[in-house]
């Protein structure tokens, strides 16, 4: 293995961090897209030099960026650097930032509203891409989870996007409500053993699964209990924050819900709580060790009213028993006067041995552990607030 | 020749350092200027006005000759000073305060 590449999205740009397999010394590249919000950057498992980035701004909307050289250069898909941006006829080559909800009767029910915070009907309005999930096998195929919640797919390297309308049209869509951060589709998990199976999660609608590549969907929220909604065990309405899966066991899912850490052993058909001895079970991130499918990581956050770690201590909690029994990992992490948050897409693991674990904070630090969480050190300390962290092992 | 002054982030996206200069055939309106701007710089499509509705994005405003044109109809003629290139059309990110 020649090294690792960590892709960091922040409130004010993207950063690419690289190191050799020892993971001791890091080179920092960036900011890319300075001043823009980078909700997510992720590389293709089929071609590690193919990266996709979601760049957005409240003023100027959504931009999709793509790199074909591991983050050295970027372009909006369809307009490669150095080439004309239009066809000889003067037409734009691509519309890589065009996300238009499919409301055609041919592809599903023409949904036009979901519920607003106060329960009134509210039109679906595209705001931004929260998460980009490249195909496991095709570098040109990539999924986008967007706000207001919907799933889009591009099969031409990000040049054009089409909604998979069966998700919003499956029946419960008009009842979905936004979470505090907006009504975002933030988690997309592709099943490596079954190309037709995709898991997604929406705040605050819950988790959903398709078994036919996105044509039809069903809510998978049985066993979730959310005390602050009118029916705590409703089919939808749960504020799922993140879901993680180990590729060797695609039927086992781990969830950090708003409150509660949950586990499913039947691909989401039912869930049980595994919060166990965690000091608080509110949080955003959750991830699975690259080589131990029963070893999972969370970063407990004090509460939904105080979005920072408890007791002024930044602690990653690790369970080696698939939940319930948790140990605090503190070596190298600040243990006093610390009031940081770690957002839902801001943790990742690498597949080296020992497994590397990475997470980014609201204070702009990216911490790395090269020993599966036993000890930590910051790669960088002073970036803008971190929104996402992904890692690639380079051949 | 029409002059358009873009905000910093849109100049970066379009890879231009200064004002953009455009040739607009026919009547010079907000709509016709933005049509030509987006045809020449397709990476700006969707950043100033919505892809589908064509409406100005809510946090952007248009000014020219000291006037706020943000709420003008897309087919309303722009001032002569814009049509002749004497003054630029300003695309500005709305910011409260300084």
Image (cartoon, grey):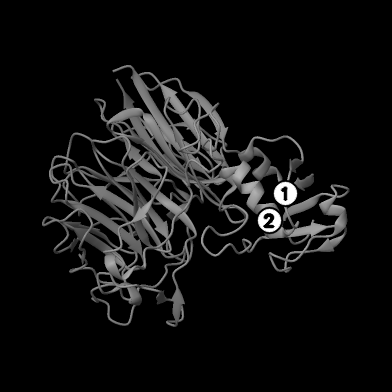
Question: Residue B44 placed where, x, y %?
Answer: 60, 47
Front one among A229 and A177? A177
Question: Residue A121 placed where, x, y %?
Answer: 43, 80
Q: Quadrant of residue B16?
A: top right
Q: Quadrant of residue A372?
A: top left
Near mark 2 (Cα within 10 A), the count class, few <14, some 14-19 or many ≥20, is some
**A375 w.r.t. A319: above or below:** above
Q: Which image quarter is the C terminus of chain A in?
A: top left
**B43 w.r.t. A261: above or below:** above
Can see residue A35? no
Dot 1: what SS?
loop
Question: Residue A171 placed where, x, y %?
Answer: 25, 74
Q: Which mark is residue B24?
A: 1
Q: Is residue A305 left or right of residue A136?
A: right
What's the distance in space between the residues labelled 1 and 2, CA to CA?
A: 7 Å
Question: Residue A219 placed where, x, y %?
Answer: 22, 67
Pinpoint the chain carrying mark 1.
B
Q: Residue at x 26, y 64 (%)?
A: A166
Q: Which image quarter is the N terminus of chain A in?
A: top left
Front one among B89 and A332? B89
Dot 2: what SS?
helix
> What residue is shown with label 2?
B32
Contact (CB < 8 A) between labels 1 and 2?
Answer: yes
**A336 w.r.t. A18: above or below:** below
Near mark 1 (Cα within 10 A), the count class, few <14, some 14-19 or many ≥20, is some
């Amino acid at each position: 293995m020649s090294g690792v590449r960590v892709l960091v999205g922040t409130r004010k740009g993207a950063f690419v961090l690289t190191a050799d397999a020892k993971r001791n010394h890091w080179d920092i590249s960036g900011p890319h897209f300075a001043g823009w919000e980078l909700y997510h950057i992720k590389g293709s498992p089929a071609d590690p030099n193919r990266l996709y980035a979601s760049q957005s701004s409240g003023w100027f909307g959504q931009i999709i960026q793509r790199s074909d050289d591991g983050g050295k250069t970027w372009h909006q898909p369809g307009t490669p650097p150095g080439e004309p941006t239009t066809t000889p006829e003067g037409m734009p080559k691509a519309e890589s930032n065009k996300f238009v909800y499919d409301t055609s009767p041919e592809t599903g029910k023409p949904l036009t509203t979901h519920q607003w915070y106060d329960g009134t009907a509210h039109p679906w309005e595209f705001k931004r891409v929260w998460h980009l999930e490249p195909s496991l096998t095709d570098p040109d195929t990539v999924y986008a989870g967007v706000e207001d919640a919907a799933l889009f797919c591009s099969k031409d390297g990000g040049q054009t996007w089409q909604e998979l309308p069966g998700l919003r049209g499956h029946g419960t869509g008009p009842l979905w409500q936004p979470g505090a951060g907006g009504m975002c589709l933030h988690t997309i998990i592709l099943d490596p053993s079954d190309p037709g199976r995709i898991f997604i999660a929406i705040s605050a609608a819950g988790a959903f699964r398709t078994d036919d590549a996105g044509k039809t969907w069903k809510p998978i929220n049985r066993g979730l209990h959310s005390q602050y909604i009118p029916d705590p065990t409703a089919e939808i309405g749960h504020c799922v924050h993140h879901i993680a899966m180990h590729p060797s066991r695609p039927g086992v899912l781990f969830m950090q819900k708003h409150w509660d850490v949950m586990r499913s052993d039947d691909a989401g058909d039912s869930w049980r709580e595994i919060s166990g001895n965690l000091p608080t079970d509110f949080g955003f991130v959750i991830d699975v060790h690259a080589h131990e499918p029963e070893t999972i990581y969370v970063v407990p956050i004090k509460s939904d009213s105080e979005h920072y770690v408890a007791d002024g201590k930044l602690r990653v909690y690790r369970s080696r028993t698939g939940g319930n029994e948790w140990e605090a990992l503190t070596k190298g992490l600040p243990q006093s006067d610390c009031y940081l948050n770690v957002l839902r897409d801001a943790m990742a693991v690498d597949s080296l041995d020992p497994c590397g674990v990475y997470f980014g904070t609201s204070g702009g630090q990216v911490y790395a552990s090269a020993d599966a969480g036993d000890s930590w050190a910051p790669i960088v300390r002073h970036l803008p607030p971190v929104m996402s962290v992904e890692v690639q092992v380079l051949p | 020749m029409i002059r358009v002054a873009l905000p910093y982030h849109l100049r970066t996206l379009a890879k231009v350092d200064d004002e953009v200069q455009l040739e607009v055939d026919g009547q010079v309106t907000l709509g016709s200027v933005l049509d030509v701007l987006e045809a020449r710089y397709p990476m700006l499509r969707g950043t100033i006005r919505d892809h589908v509705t064509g409406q100005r994005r809510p946090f952007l405003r248009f000014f020219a000759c000291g006037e706020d044109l943000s709420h003008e109809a897309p087919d309303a003629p722009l001032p002569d000073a814009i049509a002749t290139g004497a003054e630029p059309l300003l695309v500005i990110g709305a910011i409260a305060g300084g």
